[in-house]
Amino acid sequence: MAKQDKAVVTAERPWPELSKADKLAAATDLGLDVSMKILTDGGRLLDERGLEGMDPKLLAEVRGTALSIISDQIRIDAAALQASAIRHGGPAATELAEEQRLLDTAFAGLGVRRTAVIDVAASGDDITPAPEGEDV
């Protein structure tokens, strides 16, 4: 992929003058554009050639990009649900059901059994410190 000039990204101000938040926003925009190109071009090639005709490195890149985006979205959704539960004094039944649905969908897509995952309460109330002098 061609290296993009930072001046193109931030035509308003030079890169060194941007805040970290502005730099992160610009980098995120570029990252999303690159991810979309990888997914659309890789998907098009996969449709045309099938799995047997695909370059293994390109296929791995497309798969990795897709799984990364899905994983990030699951984390964002879970954080939003957790924030909503905190604001409302506790998770409602519908929020818990939605969280379970998201987790089940994510693990089904990854081919991992959901039962192999340990659920931990978001509050951390069930976590106790190790006794004094013990290594963790």
Image (cartoon, rainbow, N blue to C red):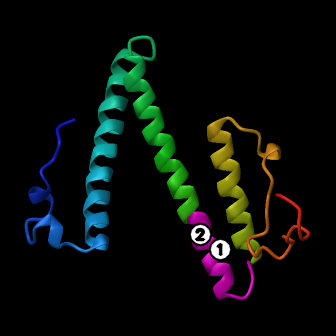
Foreground pick, 130 / 85: 130
Q: Residue at x 31, y 72 (%)?
A: 21
Q: In percent of the image, x 84 and y 70: which residue is there? A: 127
Q: Secondary structure at mark 1?
A: helix
Q: Which residues are magenta?
A: 77-91
Asked if marks 2 and 1 touch (Cβ < 8 Å), the reply is: yes
Amino acid at the residue labelled 2: Ala
Query: Is the magenta region chiefly helix, strand or loop?
Result: helix
- The residue at which mark 1 appears reads as 82
**At x 73% / y 78%, what residue is drawn?**
91
Which residue has dot 2 on it? Answer: 79
Q: Residue at x 57, y 64 (%)?
A: 77
Q: For the residue carrying disc 2, how many other residues have a C-alpha within 10 Å: few (<14), some (14-19), or many (20+)?
A: few
Verify whether residue 18 appears in magenta. no
Left or right of 73 on screen, residue 106: right
Q: Amino acid at mark 1?
A: Gln
Residue 92 picture quarter: bottom right
Q: Position of residue 111 (x, y in %)?
A: 67, 35
Position of residue 55 relative to residue 42, above or below, is above
